[in-house]
Amino acid sequence: MRELKIGERIPIEAGGEAVVSRELGRGGQGIVYLVRYNGREYALKWYFISRIKNPEAFRNNLRKNIEDGAPEGGKQFIWPLFLTETKKNGAFGYLMRLAPSGYESFTDIYNGYRWEKPRVKGQPARKIKVKFASLDVMLTAAINIVKAFRALHLAGKSYQDLNDGGFFIDTKTGDVLVCDCDNVAADGDNFGIGGMPGFMAPEVVRGIAKPDVLTDRYSLAVVLFKLFFRGDPLEGSKVLQCVVMTEENDLIHYGKDPVFIYDPSNASNRPVNGVHDNVIKLWKIYPDFIREAFTLSFTYGIQEPNARIIEKSWIQMLIQLKLDIIHCSCGKTAFSSSFEKTGEHTLRCRNCGSTIYTMGVKDYELPLNLGAKLYKCLTTKNSDDFESVTGMVIENRLKKGLFGIKNMSDDVWKAKFPDNSIREVAPGKGVPIWTGLEIDFGDNLIAKILL
């Protein structure tokens, strides 16, 4: 493939020409350029045409995706927008929007740093730390990743090449951008893409299946595991015995004989101290229900694709995990499992001794520590909006040590007190955290204080 020149004009199928400004980066499939088209800047991905198995079918699939548009919630996808004309040698590309500034690559987040080019020639590159602003933000990012793939799968498409290079994340907010969407195809179709080692489902590694929604779900579990535990779910002592990971070894450890590092019935591939310290440390921190979800994903889910966790279930678990975070007034931040349990629904901080009560609503249990937030997914039926705050645990301004829940929604709640009296809780007003008190958020959606 001939590389494009600065200033070169590339005809666009929809009309007009894109003018090449500079190279942005390159990968296995091609080169990405900054171009200007119809008065706006875009990214142009220009393919190494010899590396595409069936260029005509690949191009037609791109055109179909452009016509269909991005799935619902499409702002999360850097989706193909315009195809270029095909050159005489068969080369072509497509235009997509540019990723906004402020986003970090998943790879850099996983590594914990990125290299910044020197501003002055001759100076060394700088190693910049990359991490989430908080545990809450990391879980927001995880939920956004899953929501993006739920939207894609509901649209009847699969991503087929899910890996750590496919995401950009705002580490301050948890917003997610899914890139490399040119490999997306209708579920059941495939144009030669298998995926990246370590992320591919074992049946794809073995060559007995092509990528689809079920293999996407395996890869999604790998992405979430790497995000939470900073390690590979299948890389333990057994894999480390291979000095070099050849294609043959990849086939054995990720295809024919994959073993989860925490498989409860097979200890042959446990993480190794001094090598997998992140996984060893973080695995102990997460609640049982999350560890069980990953254990299912990488044991039974390896062998049985239909047993893999669906996106809706991941979202429910991740919302519960986000709600499970306690920010104690003493400064300790941890999952509720790190706090002492003093009753069926009561916790105590091991640092300061503060008592923390809980509230049950829908299928969730929410610790009611000072500053804890209620989200629309808790107070509205059929909602998975985990970002819009509808309530918050506050301290009474006049009576220190008396806590309550402030209504921050636009709806009037109804509170049922222990004496069975019912009072309205208007927006901006609050209700005390009392034993047995119930809150009706509307549509007979009732929460109960659990003491």
Image (cartoon, helix red, strand yellow):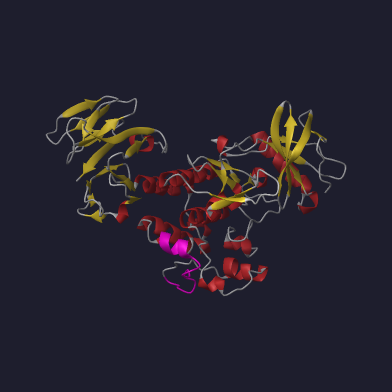
Q: Is residue 160 above or below residue 431?
A: below
Image label count? 0
Q: Is residue 203 left or right of residue 388?
A: right
For this orientation, the residue located farthest to the right is 88
Give the percent coordinates (x, y) of residue 450: 22, 45
Tell me residue 393's x, y (percent).
28, 37
Residue 43, image x and y in percent? Answer: 70, 38
Query: Quick check: is 144 in the magenta stretch?
Result: no
Magenta residue span:
265-282
Q: Quadrant of residue 34?
A: top right
Q: Is residue 217 visible?
A: no
Majority secondary structure of magenta residues: loop
- Is 421 left, or right, of 52 in this rendering? left
Q: Residue extending furthest left?
A: 419
Q: Residue at x 76, y 41 (%)?
A: 93
Q: Quadrant of residue 406?
A: top left
Assess whether residue 276 is covered by the magenta stretch. Answer: yes
The front one of 110 and 290 is: 110
Q: Horizontal and vertical percent for residue 300?
A: 47, 63
Q: Where on the picture, by quarter, is residue 250?
A: bottom right
Residue that appears at 38% across and 56% down = 286
Judged left or right of residue 234, residue 80 is right
Left or right, residue 42 beside residue 417: right
Q: Is residue 335 visible?
A: yes
